Amino acid sequence: MLTQLTKCRNHNLRSYGTCAFYVRKSHSACTERSSAIAEFQGILSEPQINLSVLRKLCFNGIPFEGGIRGLCWKILLDYLPTDQSLWDSVLAKQRETYSHFLKEMIIQPGIAKVKFGVSREDVTLEDHPLNPNPESRWNTYFKDNEVLLQIDKDVRRLCPDFSFFLKATDYPCDLIMDPKNEYETLRKRVEQTTLKSQTVARSRSGLTNVSSPLKTSTSYPLNECEPLPSGCEAHWEVVERILFIYAKLNPGIAYVQGMNEIVGPVYYTFATNPNSAWKEHAEADTFFCFTNLMAEIRDNFIKSLDDSQCGITSKMEKVYATLKEDDEELYLKLQEQNIKPQFFAFRWLTLLLSQEFVLPDVIRIWDSLFADEKRFDFLLHVSCAMLILIRDQLLAGDFTVNMRLLQDYPLSDGDVVPILKKAKELRDSKTNA
């Protein structure tokens, strides 16, 4: 009995000691977190934001609490100016502009909009659904449907490891969803069209042809999801609207498969903002931040620019050039196996790693990418760091094994921090050289 009691007491003591350690560690982490939040709040409360200081803070990760990340991303993506006194006027103007986009572009020709001060437009001989004139609004409407079909297909499978995009938004678009209005939802428009999805040919080879098992193992099939109540719309429908309007406003590039992977994390960050005042306008804010982001990376999506100095081919070659400087042995191994950067780096660079990791990890990486003063040069170092951190596996593997590793990157312990830490080391070594 004494022996059993002693063992029991020792076990309890060990358990208590372990618990005490975690309590201390947790308390320390909370204290550090609180300090970081306070530092961000201090900078963001200044009348004139010091962008250089903010970038340095954001590079190491942005807190979600209080909507800090959403606010920082808006500043880093040039949606909000550093002069805080201008924020209210900028937001009001941009959100009103987006409302006009909705009224002008999510509309079927010939539909009455009396409520919004637009007189009824009757179908006439000059403009009717069978009018072959290229200038016909109906002709444009049907051509838009081709792009819409591809967008619809992509957004429905956005971030399959999260059910978020299949759930109803707390703030459905009143303009579209109000039954008193005659606007049709894009979802309804897709359902009604007779066009076939195979008529759309805007995808880029290699962009989304390989899906990570990590990101699809817990996917949520659309046919298993409960239908949303009348008057509600899912988050993916909001993303669809953003991409459709972007395509309409940017006919030179329109929509290219993979853009959904860029807009998704931005919208998720804004739509989950704990500040309801910001959360309500997630759609409009996402549209303009996405537009600004695409202005910087759009060359990656334009096939005709692939082999130009600003195209994706040049950027992929820089990944191998940087790797050669940092780890020549690994570089030569990949060269020997004829593993070209376009086999994996095309997707890494074009989609900003959004398909390589689950959403929370992608968001953490983007904190650093958006804070990069040279605008995504850091992505090259991240790509090299990813290669170097699995160098032992790559050096030991054959072509098949290594291709599998690179197209389905093995994330150790589900933590991207070591990758970012290594990438920073690589960047700093170049800066200090």
Image (spheres, helix red, strand yellow):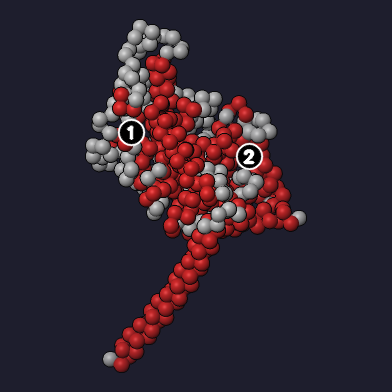
The answer to which image quadrant residue 120 occupies is: top left
* Image x and y of residue 19, in percent: 40, 76
Relative to residue 91, is residue 218 drawn left or right?
Answer: left
Question: Could you say which is closer to the camera, residue 232 or residue 383?
Answer: 232
Q: Secondary structure at mark 2?
A: helix
Query: Quarter of the image containing the C terminus?
Result: bottom right
Estimate how packed mark 1 is, as few (under 14), some (14 to 19) or many (20 or more) residues with alpha carbons within 10 Å: some
* Image x and y of residue 200, in percent: 44, 23
In the image, what residue occupies the spot 39% across and 16% down? 138
Residue type at mark 2: give it: Met
Q: Secondary structure at mark 1?
A: helix
List the single residue furthest toward the left: 229
Q: Is residue 257 above or below residue 45?
A: above
Question: Could you say which is closer to the camera, residue 403 or residue 68?
Answer: 68
| Residue 175 badge | 1
In the image, what residue occupies the spot 45% across and 34% down? 97
| Residue 316 badge | 2
Q: Is residue 189 visible?
A: no
Relative to residue 92, is residue 163 drawn left or right?
Answer: left
Query: Quarter of the image containing the N terminus?
Result: bottom left
